[in-house]
Image: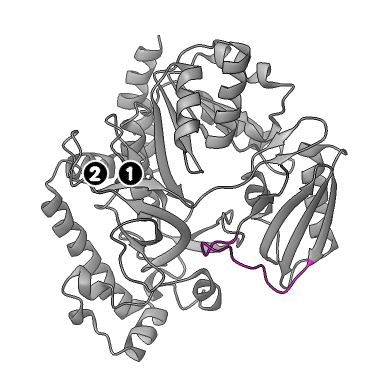
Amino acid sequence: MSDWYEQTFRRVLYPAYESGLRRRDTLNWLAAYERDQWYSPQAIAELQFQRLKTLIEHCYREVPYYRRRWRELGIQPDDIRSLDDYTRLPVLTKADIRENFEDLQASSWRDRLLFKRTGGSTGEPLELGYTHESYERRMAVMWRGYGWAGARPGRRTLYLWAGAVGTPGRVHQFKDNVYNAVFARRVLNSFEMTESNMADYADAIDRYRPSVIVGYVNPLARLATWMVETRRKVHQPAAVIGAAEALHPHQREVIGKAFGSPVYNTYGCREFMLIATECAHHHGLHVNEDHLVVELLDETGKPVQRGPGEVTVTDLSNYGMPFIRYVNGDLATPSSAHSCPCGRGLPLLERVDGRVLDAIRTPDGRILPGEFFPHMLKDVPGLAQFQLVQRQLDRLELSIVRRDGFDDASIAYIRRETAKVLGDSVELDYRFVDDIPLTRSGKRRVTLSELA
């Protein structure tokens, strides 16, 4: 029955929804990216640079920020003849985006942009603009990468994911339920996971019988550890996909042991969605080089040859509010392998090093993934930066850098939403600060647990 529905969804329902109802070109872009991945590394690099060159010329013509900055440095688009020349362009930081938000928008797209906010995995929520086409391309790249793990449109998938923040209305909940049902997916709220309700999650997996499970890494690993310790077996999916956090070897091992399935690693961020994904050979994560330019830089701004480097990304399709050489705050290690047995021409990352958000624990046995706080705080007006530290089991300390718009209602919202998932066993203290220091690795940790 599920195979029949998947085929019907992919051939009839999804095309009718994307191309007919929504009038989007996602499926056409997906077909193009499916073709591009099999080009040789040299052909993909040439395609990438052609797209990069066109984007740079567009930015110089239509984006005031880049035109001004590049002129200050004496750089013209014709000067960029190779990726080595491209590294002469300055990097873009979150501070640059906040200070030049209007000037980063292309003049011809200014009234046609879509906007969203990041959850701020480095503690700094950020608003960004993007075009309809760039969204369609991102969705296509996501489906391509998830497809390597067998997570195709319409295939029965269970998400151990972020729950809704606030109190969604009935109409909103109804739409979500219909959408998930049509797309053959079930969403379990990972923020409600505690030591005492693990069996509920296992039962939900057995009831739904997913072909694929997608989830935040830490909740997946916690559930898997409980399953191994209690010898609980569940319906075996064809694959488990870890997302939103670095997947460490010990986590991959316990998840694979618990579910009896191959475990796939992914890497993305809200600014660009999917950046890199593992294929079935697990030789590293294939970088979507036909869609992005991804660099790994050392502390001097030079490309790293070995060891972790700071991830810097350019989206080749977002002409509305382009991010050129955007430093997203993550660390990753390049792969020494020049190719993968799968035959794809996309280059490889060995691993993602720099996205580790500490889980928060409570006296009554709750374990809350660190992702809850950037997810909950991303929409708080006037919140510039934040960091949550746990030094005692029954107390949390929230440091807040505020701007205009942050008021008593913001604090009330934070307390209310935190109490929903942690109960009254933990006290939340907050303080306003001028800045939040970076870690030695150059990141700003969102959640930091100092418990043994």
Q: Residue at (27%, 45%) from the top-left corner? A: 29
Characterize the local packing of mark 1: few (<14), some (14-19) or many (20 or more) Cα atoms within 10 angstroms: many
**Colour scheme in use:** one colour
Type of secondary structure dominating the magenta stretch: loop
Q: Residue at (44%, 74%) from the top-left corner? A: 104
**Contact check, label 2 and label 1, Cβ < 8 Å:** yes
Q: Quadrant of residue 256?
A: top left
**Start-end of magenta stretch:** 432-444
Is 36 rendered above or below residue 405?
above
The residue lying toward the viewer, choosing from 187 and 86, is 86
> What is the x, y in percent for residue 88?
28, 78
Q: Identify residue type, mark 1.
A: Val
Q: CA distance from mark 2 to mark 1?
A: 7 Å
Q: Is residue 340 left or right of residue 424?
A: left
Residue beneath label 2, please?
33
The residue lying toward the viewer, choosing from 450 and 255, is 450
